[in-house]
Amino acid sequence: MSDIADRKKLWRPDPRPEWVQRINEEGYCMNIRGIVPLDPDSLIASARLSTGLSDFGAEDWREPFQALAYALDGEEAALNLMGRIRSRSELLMMLEARLRIEDAYKRHPEIDDEQIVQPFIVVGQGRAGTSFLVNTLGANPENGVIKHWEAMFPCPPPEAESYARDPRSARGHELIDQWNRVTPKFK
């Protein structure tokens, strides 16, 4: 057996909070695949229903999305109840964003005429200091640093006059707080 296979076999996740463990234990007695479906068709239908939109645009996203959904739905990920709930929530958020972005492009084709001059693009592995760098860049008001909630709910773009009270900001903070309650060691 390879070193990687040995490590995979020995790896155990950190214990979850007691309330999360109880939810997952209850899930072992249920048909969680039926209760929290992760199949692509169900996710797409739910995103369309919740937004009232249907056009996802170009189809180049569909194959990778389906591969991810099937992996999460099946034995590859072997998700427990909370894992399925969180995965469905995240995937729906992304599908809904895609629908809203495509709708915005249809209504505002002039978006393609916008020019972004000298963008800062920060990428890196987790725990590599990327958040620190983004926060440092964001200290300068000249830099348009995207907030978590703007990445989670990118469309429609926030308006300057209502930015401070945009309800998506509170929703984004709620979701991050929830994630931190489910996986407190992830912070």
Image (cartoon, rainbow, N blue to C red):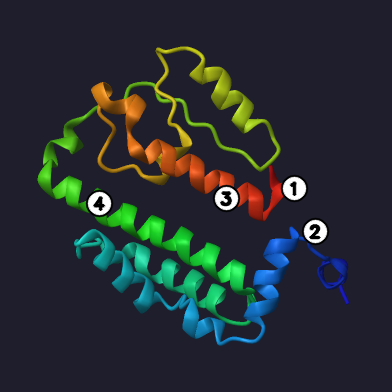
Label 4 amino acid? Arg
Tell me whether the residue at label 3 lies in contact with that at label 2, contact meaning CB atoms closer than 8 angstroms: no
Quote the CA–CA distance across marks 1 and 4.
33 Å
Tell me whether the residue at label 1 lies in contact with that at label 2, contact meaning CB atoms closer than 8 angstroms: yes
Q: Is residue 90 above or below residue 131?
A: below
Quote the CA–CA distance across marks 1 and 2.
8 Å
The answer to which of marks 3 and 2 sits earlier in the sequence is 2
Label 1 amino acid? Lys
Disc 3: which residue: 178
Q: Residue at x 88, y 69 (%)?
A: 10
The answer to which of marks 3 and 1 sits earlier in the sequence is 3
Q: Is residue 125 above or below residue 12?
A: above
**Which class describes the residues within 10 Å of circle 3: few (<14), some (14-19), or many (20+)?**
few
Disc 1: which residue: 185
Disc 2: which residue: 14
Quote the CA–CA distance across marks 3 and 4.
24 Å
Residue 70 falls left or right of residue 96: right
Residue 36 falls left or right of residue 19: left
Q: Position of residue 150 (x, y in %)?
A: 39, 37
The one of 81 and 6 positioned closer to us in this rendering: 81
Nearest to viewer (mark 4 / mark 2): 2
Quote the CA–CA distance across marks 3 and 2.
17 Å
Tell me whether the residue at label 3 lies in contact with that at label 1, contact meaning CB atoms closer than 8 angstroms: no
Nearest to viewer (mark 1 / mark 4): 1
Q: Is residue 8 above or below residue 123?
A: below
The one of 27 and 70 positioned closer to us in this rendering: 27
**Any mark on residue 100, and which?**
4
Q: Position of residue 32 (x, y in %)?
A: 55, 81
